[in-house]
Image (cartoon, helix red, strand yellow):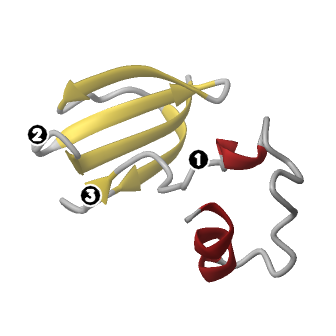
Amino acid sequence: MLDLLITHATLLDGRTDMSVAVQNGRIVDVAEGLQAPAQTTVDAAGQLLSPPFCDPHFHMDATLSHGQPRVNQSGTLLEGIALWG
């Protein structure tokens, strides 16, 4: 038995009426019209199913240059531009 089955979802690649099966916190199957016993079933009703939207960026500019020419005291973009030109 699956932990979670999401049905009738639209995926980011444009596929519609898709089902996503989850077991032990991992996606184990993605297929059209998948039917399987599950502890929880969610009907997405055609809505978009996507991975979390997150911003995984980081600032490498200070990695090897911390304090050169000086530390950006305010942490603002404008001060950074003034420091580095």
> What is the number of the mark on residue 56?
1
Residue 16 to residue 80: above or below? above
**Sequence order check, earlier mark of 1 and 2:** 2
Residue count near mark 2 (Cα–Cα under 10 Å), binned few <14, some 14–19, many ≥20: few
Amino acid type at image mark 2: Arg
Nearer the viewer's eye, disc 1 or disc 3?
A: 1
Asked which quadrant contains residue 48, the reply is bottom left
**Sequence order check, earlier mark of 3 and 2:** 2
Q: Give the CA separation, mark 3 to mark 2.
A: 10 Å
Residue 74 % position (x, y): 81, 81
Identity of the residue drawn at 30% across and 45% down: 7
Residue 3 % position (x, y): 60, 33
Identity of the residue drawn at 81% across and 69% down: 72
Q: Quadrant of the C terminus?
A: bottom right
Identity of the residue drawn at 87% across and 76% down: 73
Q: What secondary structure is marked by label 2?
A: loop
> What is the number of the mark on residue 65?
none
Residue 33 to residue 55: above or below? above
Q: Give the CA separation, mark 1 to mark 2.
A: 26 Å
Residue 32 % position (x, y): 16, 30
Q: Give the CA separation, mark 1 to mark 3.
A: 21 Å
| Residue pointed to by mark 3 | 48
Q: Nearer the viewer, residue 31 or 1?
A: 31
Q: Image check: 72 left or right of 46? A: right
| Residue pointed to by mark 2 | 15
Amino acid type at image mark 3: Leu
